[in-house]
Amino acid sequence: MEVLTEKQKKVLGFIEKSLADNNPSSQREIARNFGLARNAIRQFVSYLKKKGYLMDLGGHRGLRLSKEYLYRKKETEGIPIVGRVAAGEPILAEENIEGYVDPGELVGKSRDSFILRVAGDSMVDEGIMDGDFVVVEPASTIKNGRIGVVMLDDEATVKRIYVQRNRIALKSANRAAGYRTRYIKGTDRRIRIIGRVTGCLRAI
């Protein structure tokens, strides 16, 4: 990818931050932030697209980071943090990625790993707390009894997974709360295994 000028880096940085905040900026807002005319910002955006850093999905707020740039960031900055996962969307689509983190050598990771924020207390007995980040290795199958991530009812959930003869058991780990194991028919299209949990990072 072509090298950016300092001004181009600043514009790209502003666009990245707005996307990380789940609030994509319009070119009018970018121009206002830098105190520049919209024509100047339009030119900056054009350069960033030509150099491979941005793509335009169309519409008023359609600027997104390019797949090539996201891949480069992943290689240099660490594992992508997935802020939300919706049914039918690729896990690592650019609109799902909040940022990147380098967990160092603390956890196992593969080239395609991603990080997912945990919501809820259903796995506290396994040391996975509300707000923690789990490192996930993508997989469509999982060894029985392993902790993994499944898509269920349009949301990602972390559970200990048991694939049985004609159903999938999702077992929680919170004795105090008394969560029951949930059983889903194997043919139920609401459920899909998306990965194995290989590590956990404590939220600070």
Image: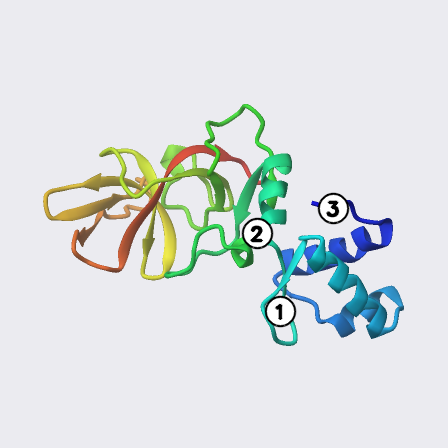
Q: Which element carries disc 1, helix, strand or loop?
A: loop
Residue corresponding to mark 3: 2
Residue 17: in sight, yes or no?
Answer: no
Q: Nearer the viewer, mark 3 or mark 2?
A: 3
* Rendered location of residue 52, percent (x, y): 67, 53
Q: Amino acid at mark 3?
A: Glu
Q: CA distance from mark 1 to mark 2?
A: 14 Å
* Rendered location of residue 44, percent (x, y): 79, 62
* Rendered location of residue 58, percent (x, y): 60, 72
Residue corresponding to mark 1: 62
Q: Nearer the viewer, mark 3 or mark 1?
A: 3
Q: Is residue 127 left or right of residue 103?
A: left
Q: Is residue 173 left or right of residue 66?
A: left
Residue corresponding to mark 2: 67
Query: Badge 3: how crowded within 10 Å, few (<14), some, or many (20+)?
Result: few
Q: Which element carries disc 3, helix, strand or loop?
A: loop
Image quadrant assignment for residue 62: bottom right
Please give the label number shown on residue 189.
none
Q: Residue at x 59, y 40 (%)?
A: 74
Q: Amino acid at mark 1?
A: Gly
The answer to whether the residues at label 3 and label 2 have Cβ atoms under 8 Å apart is no
